[in-house]
Image (tube, coloured by chain):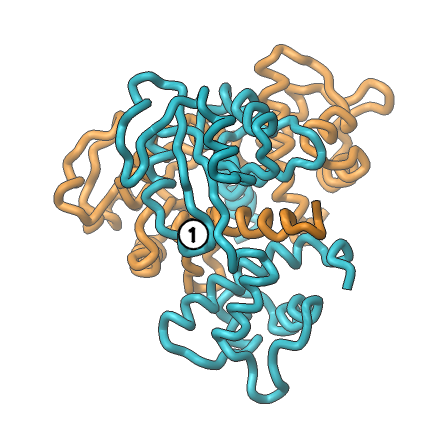
Chain colours: A cyan, B orange
Amino acid sequence: MNPLAIPEIVIRRLPLYLRVLNRLADDGRTLTSSQELGDTLGISSTQIRKDLSYFGEFGKQGTGYGVRYLRDQLRQILQVDRRWNLVLIGAGDLGRAILRYNGFQEGGFSIVAVLDNDQEKIGRQIGKLKVQDVAKLPEVIAEHGVQIAVIAVPASEAQEVAEALVNAGVNAILTYAPITLSLPDHIRVEYIDPLIGLQTMAYYLSPGHL
Amino acid sequence: MNPLAIPEIVIRRLPLYLRVLNRLADDGRTLTSSQELGDTLGISSTQIRKDLSYFGEFGKQGTGYGVRYLRDQLRQILQVDRRWNLVLIGAGDLGRAILRYNGFQEGGFSIVAVLDNDQEKIGRQIGKLKVQDVAKLPEVIAEHGVQIAVIAVPASEAQEVAEALVNAGVNAILTYAPITLSLPDHIRVEYIDPLIGLQTMAYYLSPGHL
């Protein structure tokens, strides 16, 4: 099947399935079902079977899915059976929280460098990494073959940082800064913006919706 | 129009429109258009006009939208023209980053208390707030009329914290912990999980997609 024909909303659910499968595997479970995955995630079992059918046949009618098999297949589909080197820009509270979060590592991503423009922060040790001068960005990216970057700088600096990343060869950016980045079309950007979730919930907390 | 008939995907885009309108207003702009909003966000102008039409007529053919007017209307629709009191559970690096982020305040949300179960952290001052013992959760929630909570604790503690929040009367939870919470159906939960974005981008960085 032409991968371009698979809706992005389907791709975006695969990491959720993978998260549940990882936990089931950690718990020593060998078999699961679209029903169990769906109940855990609040998604219908029909939707899950339809999503997976874009990529092949992963289970048998009546016996369900092998947990490790489906997990490994999803890792392969998402290309996280390899390891991606990330750079992190921003060594403030948020940057430190990101560095200390194990989930990146477990999900297929290694933060190989953290950079900042603050002379107070440059040279400091955070976990295994020493904060580097953001001026070294092009060298760091070339040295580690980095394609994906994480931005954890204030909104006022995010556009400039993003442009420097793109100029240095990065193709994909995960940004925590609450501004919409203006970048060439071929650059993929994912936003982490807690206000989207909070304001959506506020809407549904209105008297007419409770 | 019956608010239940408006698709959630539409509601979820309103905060994005609001974000752009806030910036335009800060820049002193008085008029905008669905075209400009769309170009900034990478959404078609047709989609934006269709989304807004669920809620009324906000612009005039040929003159566009009044920036402040549309901003105020969206704030009202999303119920963020009032202020929501939030509690934050977890005073680690992530909790501190959340406390120092101005965006919550600007978006209609005030963090009125931060709580933790770590005796080392309880009593410490972070900005204007002193970290309180999580055992005081019910009193804090009742005192401030809190309906929304933010969870910034490790995955292993998130389910227990979420249940305590629900028992104390919280109706909506924004969680940064990378596990799917199991809660009563009427509780709204929004997840902040950077792996979803990273793994989605990894998929699209495969050779067939570049």
Q: Which residue is mark 1?
A: B171
The C terminus of chain B lies in quadrant: top right
- Which chain letter goes with mark 1? B
The residue at the point 62 percent across, 53 percent down is B203
Residue B7 locus on image (x, y percent)? 68, 51
Q: Nearer the viewer, residue A10 or A124?
A: A124
Farthest residue toward the front?
Answer: A143
Q: Amino acid at mark 1?
A: Asn
Residue B124 locus on image (x, y percent)? 17, 33
Instruction: Classify residue A165 by image quadrant.
Output: top right
In the rendered view, would you say B6 is above or below B72?
below
In the rendered view, would you say A23 is above or below A59?
above
**B27 left or right, relative to A92:** right
The residue at the point 52 percent across, 60 percent down is A81
Q: Nearer the viewer, residue B108 or A48?
A: A48
Residue B208 locus on image (x, y percent)? 71, 52
**B132 left or right, relative to B52:** left
User: Would you say residue B87 is visible in this rendering?
Assistant: no
Farthest residue toward the right?
Answer: B62
Kindly state the secondary structure of the residue where label 1 is placed: loop
In the rendered view, would you say B70 is above or below A99?
above
The residue at the point 40 percent across, 28 percent down is A115
Number of numbered discs present? 1
Disc 1 crowd rating (10 Å Cα; few below 14, some 14-19, many 20+) is many
Residue B190 locus on image (x, y percent)? 49, 50
**B7 left or right, relative to A119:** right
